[in-house]
Every structure is written in structure tokens, then in C-alpha cells.
Amino acid sequence: MVHQDGRIDKYYTQEVGMKHPLLALCLAVLLWLGLSQPSWAAIQEDIDLLIDTNECPVCILDKADLSGLDLNGANLKIATLTGANLSNADLTRSNLVLAYMDDINLSGAILKEAQMNGAQLSKANLSGADLSGVEMTQANLLNANLSNANLEGAIMLAVKLGEANLKGANLKDANLRGVNRSMVLFCNTTMPDGSIENRNCD
């Protein structure tokens, strides 16, 4: 896991080492140097493993095209999916805890009741996604596109949003405790209490 200040979590490195020793060595060097995690190309072996077994924790799936796949209940804990395309994929009840997904395309994806606590989703495209009942405590959604997304009943404690686009989104009954909403874009957005927020309508 990469922290806000760019540090790589030592536990992330340890778990990667269990599957990809050489990659773990690279991460360890970056950790020692205090640098952030780079983006790798997807490992075909990991793509095949995911498709065949629906289990691929700590996998390298950066920039992979997984659009439209049925990944219901998939285990992708601590996987890296930077720049990957999972548009219209079914990730219902999937495990994406601590997954690294900056710049990912999840537009139209189904993520109902998915576990996404601590996930990195900076600049992610989640437009039109179904995130109802999702758990994403302390996830990083800085400047993500959540327009027209369904977040009804989502648990979003201490989520980082920055200038995230929530225009047309449904946040009814969502738990946003500890979330700074001062820069978030709202227009025809259903708030947790059922009211409609239009502060950023053109």
C-alpha cells in the first residue's frame, strides 16, 4: 500500500514477496529510497489466474483489459490495477481491500457490497457504477469521477474525495463521517439524508 506521502507499506512488500520475489525486491528498494510505487504492465500469468480461479490477491494487473468480465466474489486483495479497464465488469462482493487502482476505469461496473477498505482510487472513473452497500473506509478517491454512481448505503468513513465528481450520484443512507466535502462537485446529488444538493450545477 502506498501512503499519502508516497511511502510504501512494509506489509504490502511482504505480501508481494510471497508471490513475486523479484518484484518484492524492487518494492523493498523503493521503500528504502522512500519512493512511490511504479506502474507495471499486467502479468499474463496473473490475468489467467484471475479468469480461471477468481482468486488473484497481490496480483499485477496494471493496464489489463478486464472489461465486462464476471468477477463476482473475486479476491483481489492488495492487487495492483493501475490504469486497468474493468468497465461494466461484475465485481459484486469482491475483495479489493488495499488494492491499488489509480486511474482505473470502473465505469458501469457492479461493485455491490464489495470490500474496498483502504483502496487507492485516485482519478478513478466510477461513473455510473453500482457501489451500493460497498465498504470503503479510508479509501483514496481523490478527484475520482463518481458521476451518476449509486452509493446507497455505502460505508465511506474518512474517505478522501478532494474534487471528486459526485454529480447525479445517489448517496442515500451512505455513511460519510469524517469526510471533507468542501471541494466535492455536487449537482442533482442525493445526499445521505435524502435531500438534493445542487451547489455545483452550471
Image: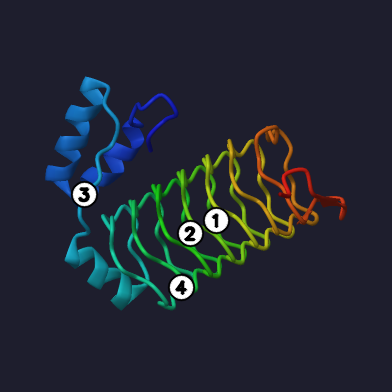
Q: CA distance from mark 3 to mark 1?
A: 24 Å
Q: CA distance from mark 1 to mark 2?
A: 5 Å
Contact? badges 4 and 3 (CB < 8 Å): no
Q: Which residue is mark 3?
A: 40
Instruction: Judge left or right: residue 74 versus residue 151.
Output: left
Q: Quadrant of residue 33?
A: top left
Q: At label 2, which amino acid type do we have?
A: Asn
**Residue 127, percent across and down?**
56, 61
Q: Secondary structure at mark 1?
A: loop
Q: Which residue is mark 4?
A: 89
From the image, which quarter does the N terminus lie in?
top left
Q: Secondary structure at mark 4?
A: loop
- 26 above or below 134? above
Disc 4 or disc 1, which is closer to the eye? 4
Residue at the image point whose x is 60% and y is 43% from the top: 137
**Residue 32, percent across and down?**
22, 22
Q: CA distance from mark 2 to mark 4?
A: 14 Å
Q: Which residue is mark 1?
A: 115
The foreground one among 106 and 183 is 183
The crowd level at tag 3 (other Cα within 10 Å; few <14, some 14-19, many 20+) is some
**Circle on res. 95:** 2
- Answer with mark 3 or mark 1, whichever residue precedes in sequence: 3
The crowd level at tag 2 (other Cα within 10 Å; few <14, some 14-19, many 20+) is many
Instruction: Judge left or right: residue 57 versus residue 30.
Output: right
Q: At label 3, which amino acid type do we have?
A: Trp
Q: CA distance from mark 2 to mark 3?
A: 21 Å
Contact? badges 1 and 2 (CB < 8 Å): yes
Q: Secondary structure at mark 3?
A: loop
Disc 2 or disc 4, which is closer to the eye? 4
